[in-house]
Image (cartoon, grey):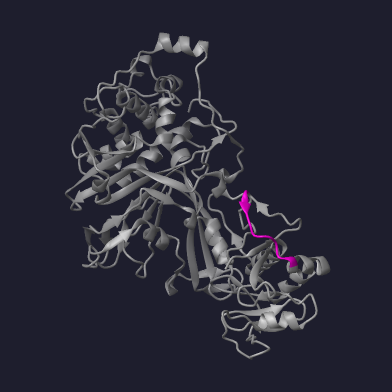
């Protein structure tokens, strides 16, 4: 049923969207009574935990019944805003609500749904919308719930940014002279896209090669390094490294003058050198030995030639870039600040976690930064299906108490995994939280949502399970369907809150302006990291989409493949980039 829209000035166009003409009966009702009847309804609003939906009840135990037929179980019951008479409306049958409006003097056409707290015009027999009414309902709901917000990491990057139109760059005379004197043309003697180069396996390093291939072709990361935003020569000079080492060679026996051997290790510098080598036009496989050595220095507990987990390497590498930037900054930045370093500028998002008391509806809200989202393949079976990688929580694999022998069968979808991730989850009796309103520990309902989307969303599929009871590990080989285009709108906090509050258009907590409006919610798949084989004897391969063509990167070998091969692959990590990127009006261009 389409709703009619009512505004103070009878606008038919709102936010470039065309709506039906406003309801004349609602306009007459407002002209006669103003918004006073809407505010009076606040005392009759009742919020039922844990859903948070508002209903109209004069008394919490009241059972509304139609005044004409006495039914209480009809599809819709409406209370007249003029006389509070309750009538039913059950099309295609007779409408006692419409009959009530016809039998009464003018002014009894507008009613409110007693179970949904939505306005209904009995004369038009249609739902109508009024912003003041929604404001009264939302304000009443939030006051009733007495929501408390506890921010574990203040979402500083939710601030409003002024957008500017993209303007293609064209060199001026000075730029042309610099390019002619300081550069040489690149030769591309292959049909393959530039930058597509194999990486040599240095000894069970396919986990590293697979992630590096995805990062080398991550559009915002690629643009950052290829535009010389992190110059390794300048970075080494700034940190007191001699020019003899500026080309990337390291004298590992020397330090920074203070005895700190790892003071000048910079993963971003090694990334810059790798980007230069990969996009040089040379097609021979490249050996990322210097980067491997630097990563070993950063993650000494993983420094070995044993096979490692690709997801764990991804998180560790981003932390290494982040920590190096932190050492160079006088003012510390948290991971939740999206501008702290290029790693978090590209991959950092913010999650919202709501824990609602099942008794009174009190809600505790926390915000946490994340650089990827870990998803379970299996349906929710009593344990938490949510795992997020943050600065302090790098859990890569889920831990289960038992192994289900049939869980390798069947098909999962990425949208289904995201639905489970954002689905309300009833916490067990052993996970009761302290309700500040009840002042005792109560059973609760927890719901996750995405408060801020990153430029690039990385989804990690938890295929490796570890059982602490059976003391064994296994791999889940269940097939996962993933789309090439993904709309993240249903999983945003704004969408989930609106659904919780009855899909109202009024702004919600932290919704002014909505952080989702700052960035596009439409994403495109550009890289898939796959894992084949067993838990302790597997192999990682990456599929890349470049110029609408898919390529398989298997260490040093790069081949062109059909998209059906990609769809059939056993996805372990999926990388999605926003279809539309917005530019800031101003940006600090200091070399990081």
Q: Quadrant of residue 85?
A: bottom right
> Is residue 177 shown in magenta?
no
Q: Please state the horizontal and vertical placement of residue 271, each as a whole percent of the image.
A: 36, 30
Left or right relative to 429: residue 87 = right
Residue 572 drawn at (x, y percent): 29, 50
Looking at the figure, which quarter contains the N terminus? bottom right
Residue 71 versus residue 317 in the image, above or below: below
Predominant secondary structure in magenta? loop
Region in magenta: 16-24
Write the residue at 35% across / 13% down.
184
Say whether residue 247 is left or right of residue 502. Answer: left
Frontmost residue, 319 versus 579: 579
**Seen in the image, is 575 located left or right of residue 112?**
left
Give the residue displayed 53% in from the left and 38% down from the top: 582
Q: Would you place residue 9 above or below residue 274 in this image?
A: below
Foreground pick, 96 / 316: 96
Q: Position of residue 483 (x, y in %)?
A: 35, 51
Q: Is residue 35 visible?
A: no
Number of marks present in the image shown: 0
The quarter of the displayed image where residue 361 is located: bottom right
**Residue 20 within the magenta-colored segment of the rendering:** yes
User: Which residue corresponds to the image point at 47% horizontal and 57% vertical from the top-left?
Assistant: 491
């Amino acid at each position: 049923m389409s709703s009619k829209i009512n505004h103070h000035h009878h606008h038919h166009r709102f936010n470039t969207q065309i709506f039906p003409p406003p309801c004349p009966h609602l306009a007459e009702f407002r002209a006669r009574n103003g918004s006073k009847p809407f505010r009076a309804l606040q005392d009759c609003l009742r919020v039922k935990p844990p859903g948070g939906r508002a209903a109209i009840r004069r008394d919490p135990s009241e059972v509304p019944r139609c005044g004409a037929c006495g039914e209480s179980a009809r599809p819709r019951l409406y209370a007249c805003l003029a006389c509070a008479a309750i009538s039913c409306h059950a099309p295609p049958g007779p409408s006692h609500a419409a009959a009530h409006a016809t039998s009464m003097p003018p002014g009894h056409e507008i009613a409110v749904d007693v179970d949904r707290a939505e306005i209904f015009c009995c004369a038009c027999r249609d739902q109508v919308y009024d912003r003041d009414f929604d404001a009264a309902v939302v304000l009443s709901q939030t006051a009733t719930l007495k929501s408390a917000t506890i921010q574990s990491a203040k979402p500083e990057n939710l601030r409003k940014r002024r957008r500017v139109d993209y303007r293609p760059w064209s060199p001026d005379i000075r730029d042309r002279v610099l390019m002619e004197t300081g550069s040489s043309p690149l030769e591309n003697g292959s049909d393959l896209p530039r930058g597509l180069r194999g990486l040599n396996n240095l000894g069970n390093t396919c986990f590293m090669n697979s992630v590096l291939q995805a990062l080398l072709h991550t559009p915002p990361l690629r643009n950052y390094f290829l535009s010389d935003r992190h110059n390794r020569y300048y970075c080494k000079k700034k940190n007191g490294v001699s020019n003899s080492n500026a080309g990337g060679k390291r004298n590992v026996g020397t330090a920074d003058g203070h005895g700190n051997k790892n003071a000048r290790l910079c993963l971003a510098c090694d990334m810059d050198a790798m980007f230069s080598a990969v996009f040089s036009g040379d097609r021979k496989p490249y050996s990322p030995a210097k980067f491997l050595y630097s990563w070993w220095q950063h993650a000494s507990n993983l420094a070995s030639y044993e096979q490692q987990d690709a997801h764990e390497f991804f998180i560790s590498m981003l932390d290494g870039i982040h920590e190096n930037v932190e050492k160079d900054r006088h003012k510390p930045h948290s991971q939740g600040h999206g501008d702290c370093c290029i790693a978090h500028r590209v991959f950092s998002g913010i999650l919202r976690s709501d824990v609602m008391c099942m008794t009174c509806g009190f809600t505790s809200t926390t915000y946490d930064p994340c650089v990827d989202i870990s998803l379970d393949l299996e349906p929710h079976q009593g344990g938490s299906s949510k795992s997020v990688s943050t600065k302090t929580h790098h859990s890569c694999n889920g831990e289960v108490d038992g192994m289900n022998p049939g869980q390798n069968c069947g098909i999962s979808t990425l949208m289904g995994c995201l639905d489970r991730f954002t689905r309300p989850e009833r916490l067990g009796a052993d996970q009761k939280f302290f309700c500040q309103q009840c002042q005792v520990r109560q059973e609760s309902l927890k719901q996750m949502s995405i408060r801020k989307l990153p430029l690039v969303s990385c989804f990690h599929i938890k295929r490796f399970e570890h059982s602490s009871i059976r003391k064994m590990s296994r791999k889940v080989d269940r097939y996962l369907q993933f789309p090439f285009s993904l709309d993240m709108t249903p999983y945003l906090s704004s969408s989930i809150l609106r659904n919780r509050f009855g899909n109202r258009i009024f702004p919600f907590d932290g919704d002014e302006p909505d952080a989702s409006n700052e960035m596009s919610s439409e994403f495109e798949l550009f890289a898939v990291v796959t894992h084949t084989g067993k838990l302790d004897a597997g192999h990682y391969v990456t599929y890349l989409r470049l110029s609408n063509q898919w390529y398989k990167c298997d260490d040093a070998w790069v081949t062109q493949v059909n998209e059906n091969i990609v769809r059939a692959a056993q996805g372990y990590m999926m990388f999605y980039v926003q279809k539309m990127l917005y530019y800031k009006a101003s940006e600090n261009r200091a070399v990081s």
